[in-house]
Image (cartoon, rainbow, N blue to C red):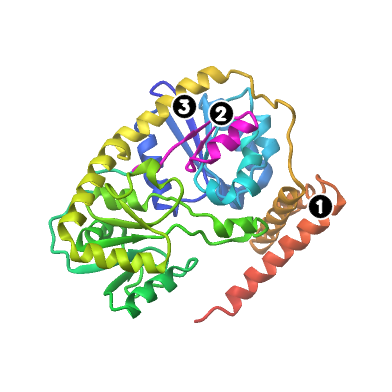
Amino acid sequence: MRNKNILFLTPTDESQFLNFFTKELGQYVNDLQVLNVPRYFSDQGLGNTERHVRDLIADKRIDIVMSCPIATSHHLSVEFFASLKGEAKIVFWMLDDEMFFDCYSKYYGQVADIVVTGDYFSVAGYERIGIPAVNFTACFSRRFYSPIEINKDIDVCFLGNCDKADREDYINFLIENGISVETFGIGSKNGPVEESELPVIFSRSKINLDFTKPEVSWPNRKEVLVNRTRVTKGRWVEIALTKSFCLTEYAPSTNLSFEIGKEIDVFSNKRELLEKVRLYLANRRKREEIAENGYKRALACHEAESGIPRILGKLEVLLEKTGEQNKNAGGIYLSKNFKIDSISIMTFLAFSLIKKKKLSYALEIFSKLLKYGNLVFFQGFAGGLSMSVENICSKIFAPR
């Protein structure tokens, strides 16, 4: 895409991966414009945000609008993205389809020219509604993640949010059975660490754990089967690039990235986790052999300097083929739950603007809350009001 101008719409600048990806993306396109949508929305309101996007497309001669939303991102509506068709190609880069495909992603995806998804199984879901989709497993740079020669003084390590799902239960089970475990991150024994420390911690550890059970959150609270989902993320790639051993909770797409038993190993329950931890702590040669194989696979398939240009090349070819075939084909279909969630988020955003004394911007949002009808409005408004009250209370009663 060396000759393409891209407008990248990001939901945050607090994501380590998105910040890295944005920086890398700029190396492979003609011109990259980056817009933090929630921040601009908070400063300038809904109408100005939409106008700013259109102005950037026109002034910067944008070829592709690439949006990477999270499931609470309703700042720019499905209908707004549909209205951009013809002005630029629309690409959604979805990171959490394992958890949010059914409640969020597919509704935005229907107006895209192409969707990039981190979930292998969601590709078929998009294609079933006529949207070309490609799978992209997270890539990281060997300039940052690389092997470090250091004493492996940690038997078992978990680096991540210990408060999510049942991670603490698994970790405590190992400890209760005599395994020495060090944890880093939110809710952990050692607390959060700087990004620069990650490769060192992985390299110090004989066994690096990875968990795949997601945490049900507000956007997917009605999709109860998410509790049975197992989510593959990029942690194992980071670990592999440091030539360290990873033992991950099984997920159905694990073997699409690494060969189980040869480049990574898996567990499915507490008992199996304990057995494999004991096995690999006692078998240094096997542990290092798997780590070596995983390192080679990561360099070949999951290293950013080759992986990102590869996916961009694939996108360029597919975008040339799509033409106008998806331009509002068959109309826009939104479920009642999606509409209610959208109104809830917009209501919450309106109250947030009132708190910032930006009343005209808040009134602008309130004037649009009836767009899906009275019943959706009442349910959505109640949800947004509840979120606003909860947000205020959490700050008032937060520990000091």
Comes first in the chain, label 3 or label 2? 2
Other residues around mark 1 within 10 Å, as few (<14) / some (14–19) / many (≥20): many
What is the x, y in percent for residue 162?
Answer: 42, 69
What kind of residue is marked 1? Val
Q: Nearer the viewer, residue 95 or 347?
A: 95
- Image-based side of 339 in relation to 217, left or right: right
Label drawn at residue 376: 1
Tell me the residue that label 2 is attached to.
132
Query: Looking at the image, is mark 2 or mark 1 nearer the viewer?
Result: 2
Decide whether residue 145 is among the magenta residues: no
Tell me the residue that label 3 is attached to.
315
Picture residue at 75% right of the left edge, 53% below the top? 340
- Answer whether labels 3 and 2 touch (C-beta < 8 Å): no
Picture residue at 48% right of the left edge, 30% below the top? 6
- The residue tagged with tag 2: helix, strand or loop? loop
Q: CA distance from mark 2 to mark 1?
A: 31 Å
What is the x, y in percent for residue 175?
Answer: 33, 77
Q: Nearer the viewer, residue 87 or 174?
A: 174
Comes first in the chain, label 2 or label 1? 2
- The residue tagged with tag 1: helix, strand or loop? helix
**Magenta stretch bounds:** 115-139
